Image (cartoon, helix red, strand yellow):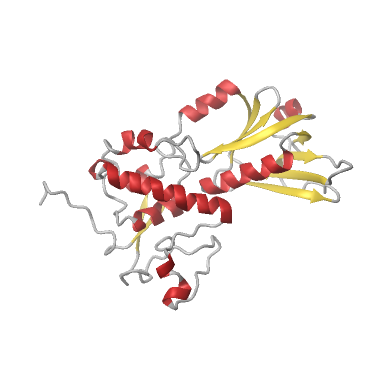
């Protein structure tokens, strides 16, 4: 599933390509025919994302709400000579016609979990159910801490709970916990608020870099391949990481074997030496 930085990049691409233009909207697949007909031939104002939720705003405070889910894609193609016929199951197609001063552009949405036309009130109801987004200027870490600081659930679960924190996926979860030497099964309520704020601040930086580069890089300069004399990572996700998908391999920092475990249907990754099991003072 795409992580939050991917949705922010997508929102930026949609805004820069279609924002301020009258667009044609259609549903070649047919599943969004009624919704697309209502915004066809109207002004697309902009697009924004909150965590993994994307909202495309049209004139009249109408929004197309998109959640890509596990398999969804939204491909934006700008500056084309000719808009091609749709290929495959295109739920939503946006087209910016060519003008004298610019060529055409189009975007195709496929395989999304959610594609719905919603009102401003319905959009607000969606946003009320999700936690703060580290990539947004209005993201409030104290809102997330109000849940994390009193929860007995593992921090590895809480970071992936979109009602607690918006936009963090499996890669950022594994990597930020490694960077702060926190075991993923440690109960949220055992963290200090200073530890949580350090995690939040790190996510702001790491995810912000992901928006700029389009990949997830979490390894500090001293642990990069050129600094350590090791081969670069080869993975379809790209980017240099510490523990994500590195189970049974040596930790870049201490050399211990990286471990994995399923939690809530998703794989955890951690280093048992750099991220020791938490033991409370009361237990000791």
Q: Residue at x 28, y 38 (%)?
A: 149
Q: Residue at x 41, y 40 (%)?
A: 161
Q: Is residue 143 above or below residue 193?
A: above
Question: For the view shown, which residue lies furthest in the right direction?
Answer: 100
Left or right of 158? Residue 98 is: right
Quadrant of the rendered image containing residue 196:
top left
Instruction: Please state which of residues 118 and 192 is positioned toward the viewer in this rendering.
Output: 192
Q: Position of residue 59 (x, y in %)?
A: 71, 25
Task: Count all numbered tags in the image, as a single digit.
Answer: 0
Q: Position of residue 29 (x, y in %)?
A: 73, 39
Quadrant of the rendered image containing residue 245:
bottom left
Q: Position of residue 242 (x, y in %)?
A: 40, 63
Left or right of 86? Residue 265 is: left
Instruction: Please state which of residues 270 and 23 is positioned toward the viewer in this rendering.
Output: 23
Quadrant of the rendered image containing residue 49:
top right
Left or right of 6? Residue 108 is: right
Instruction: Please state which of residues 7 and 36 is positioned toward the viewer in this rendering.
Output: 7
Instruction: Please state which of residues 267 and 197 is positioned toward the viewer in this rendering.
Output: 197
Left or right of 48? Residue 224 is: left
Q: Is residue 225 above or below residue 236?
A: below
Question: For the view shown, which residue lies furthest in the bottom direction?
Answer: 229
Q: Position of residue 65 (x, y in %)?
A: 61, 33
* Residue 265 seen in this snapshot: no
* Residue 40 seen in this snapshot: yes
């Amino acid at each position: 599933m795409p992580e939050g930085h991917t949705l922010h990049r997508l929102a930026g691409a949609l805004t820069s390509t279609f924002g301020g233009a009258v667009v044609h909207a259609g549903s070649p697949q047919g599943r969004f025919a009624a919704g697309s007909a209502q915004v066809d031939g109207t002004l697309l104002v902009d697009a924004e994302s909150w965590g993994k939720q994307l909202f495309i705003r049209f004139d009249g405070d109408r929004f197309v709400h998109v959640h890509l889910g596990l398999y969804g894609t939204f491909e934006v193609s700008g500056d084309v000579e000719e808009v091609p016929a749709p290929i495959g199951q295109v739920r939503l197609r946006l087209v910016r016609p060519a003008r004298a001063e610019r060529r055409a552009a189009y975007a195709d949405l496929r395989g999304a979990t959610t594609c719905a036309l919603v009102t401003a009130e319905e959009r607000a109801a969606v946003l009320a159910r999700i936690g703060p987004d580290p990539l947004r200027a209005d993201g409030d870490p104290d809102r997330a801490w109000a849940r994390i600081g009193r929860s007995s659930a593992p921090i590895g679960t809480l970071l992936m709970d979109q009602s607690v924190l918006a936009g963090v996926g499996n890669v950022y979860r594994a990597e930020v916990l490694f960077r702060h030497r926190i075991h993923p099964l440690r109960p949220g309520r055992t963290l200090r608020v200073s530890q949580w704020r350090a995690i939040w601040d790190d996510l702001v930086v790491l995810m912000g870099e992901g928006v700029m580069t389009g990949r997830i890089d979490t390894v500090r300069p001293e642990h990069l391949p050129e600094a350590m004399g090791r081969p670069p990572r080869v993975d379809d996700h790209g980017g240099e990481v510490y523990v994500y998908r590195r189970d049974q391999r040596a930790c870049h920092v201490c050399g211990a074997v990286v471990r994995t475990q399923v939690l809530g249907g998703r794989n955890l990754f951690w280093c048992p030496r750099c991220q020791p099991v938490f033991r409370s003072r009361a237990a000791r």
